[in-house]
Image: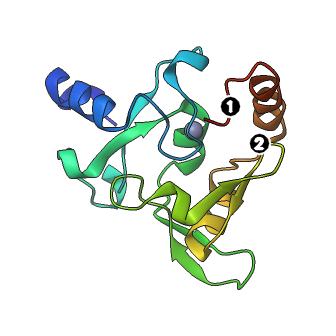
Amino acid sequence: MNRNRIPPELRERVRQQAGERCGYCLSRQEYVWGTLEVEHIVPLSAGGVDAEENLWLACRPCNSHKSSQTEAMDPETGQGVPLFNPRTQVWREHFAWSEDGAQIIGLTAIGRATVVALRLNDTRLVAIRRRWVEVGWHPL
Ligand SMILES: [Zn+2]
């Protein structure tokens, strides 16, 4: 992936559109060490382009687990479904926070498949979210 192909103005616009949050796990830029990455919703390797409509913001763990995937298996039905598209789909329609705020629950086939594929409830991430809940940073 050649990051330099995306002009700085476009990167900044995508950051603003995404509200400085990861489109998948909703981690806020102000809570993570690394800079949230401008990611290709449809990866370049799968024919995606550098256009605004194919770009969103993702944290390093989500982006690296997503990698070149465009679809994944819904663990409930075994069916392959597209991954969640943070630009065109609404997070709350596909996901919810667990009662303690630490885990992401997939509400739909797309949500469930994305939770598994992007490892949104990785043990370390859940532990960090528990801390965020304790200090009142999450979920907001
Ligand atoms: Zn994330």
Please give the count of numbered marks on the rendered protein. 2
Q: Which numbered disc flags the more N-terminal residue, 1 or 2?
A: 2
- Amino acid type of the residue that numbered disc 1 sits on in the rendered structure: His
Q: Residue at x 74, y 24 (%)?
A: 132
Q: Secondary structure at mark 2?
A: loop
Of the numbered discs in the image, which one, if any, rests on residue 55? none
The residue to which callout 1 is attached is: 138
Image quadrant of ligand 1 equals top right
Question: At which x and y percent is residue 5?
Answer: 19, 31
Q: Who is closer to the viewer here, 115 or 5? A: 115
Of the numbered discs in the image, which one, if any, rests on residue 101? 2
Q: Quadrant of the N terminus?
A: top left
Residue 53 in the image: above or below residue 84: above
Question: Which image quarter: residue 19?
Answer: top left
Density class for disc 1 (Cα within 10 Å; few <14, some 14-19, many ≥20) is some
Q: Residue at x 75, y 80 (%)?
A: 76
Question: At which x and y percent is residue 32?
Answer: 59, 19
Residue 133 in the image: above or below residue 54: above
Q: Secondary structure at mark 1?
A: loop
Question: At which x and y percent is residue 129?
Answer: 76, 31
Q: Who is closer to the viewer here, 6 or 107? A: 107
**Is 72 on the left-hand or right-hand side of 7?**
right
Q: Can you see residue 2?
A: no
Q: Residue at x 53, y 32 (%)?
A: 59
Q: How is the image coloured?
A: rainbow
Question: At which x and y percent is residue 43?
Answer: 36, 52
Q: Is the CB of mark 1 within 8 Å of ligand 1?
A: no
Q: Residue at x 60, y 35 (%)?
A: 140
Contact (CB < 8 A) between labels 1 and 2?
yes
- Amino acid type of the residue that numbered disc 2 sits on in the rendered structure: Gly
